[in-house]
Amino acid sequence: MADQNPLIACLMDIERHVSTAGWDQPARLFALVTTATLLEVEPQLVGRVPEASLDALTAIEQDEFHVGDDLEERLESIFWPDTVEGCALALERAFLPARYEADVPEDPAEAAEFVAKHPERSDVRVVVGVLRDGTRHGLARVVSEPDELLGAENLVPGLGEALLNTFRSVVE
């Protein structure tokens, strides 16, 4: 696996960018490309994109991305060109303290409503990114702790796997 530092730096940039729009945002998808590749494919960006490190990752938001009813199903429909080194997803979710886990209904719609209306609900924004070689990392910011940014390699394992699957071969 590659050095995680370029990925983490890129995810931090994404989180800063997304946070400027506040909370209650839809999921946002980003292609991650090396700065050198970006400038090669889009030469008009020379001088507008920082060129200090050509092997750094640059995030390109996929404006046409909309989740719909099923995030996993939507991600399964995505295939990236070879110029894309990785991808990242920023999304918000609500969660409850573990002590309420047994109280959450089995039905997904009922569970979502239960969590949304619960007085001890916490909202979190996660930014999870992966590279083609399997490198992954995630960041999280809880609305009640706006100055803290949590991070871990496998912060949201299922989301990391779903993002990594977007790099599967079309001929598989």
Image (cartoon, helix red, strand yellow):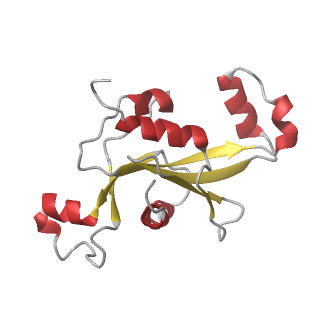
Image quarter of the C terminus:
top left
* Left or right: 95, with 65 as reference point: right
Quarter holding residue 150: bottom right
- The residue sitting at the top extreme is 107
- The residue sitting at the front extreme is 1
Task: Give the residue drawn at x 51%, y 38%.
Answer: 161
Task: Give the residue drawn at x 22%, y 65%.
Answer: 36
Query: Is residue 86 in sight in this rendering?
Result: yes
Residue 12 higher or lower than 31, as above or below = below
User: Which of 68/117 is in front?
Assistant: 68
User: Which of 63/102 is in front?
Assistant: 102
* Left or right: 44, with 108 as reference point: left
* Left or right: 73, with 58 as reference point: right
Q: Position of residue 77 (x, y in %)?
A: 36, 29
Q: Position of residue 107 (x, y in %)?
A: 70, 20
- The residue sitting at the right extreme is 99
Task: Give the residue drawn at x 52%, y 43%.
Answer: 160
Q: Position of residue 108 (x, y in %)?
A: 66, 24
Task: Give the residue drawn at x 31%, y 75%.
Answer: 53
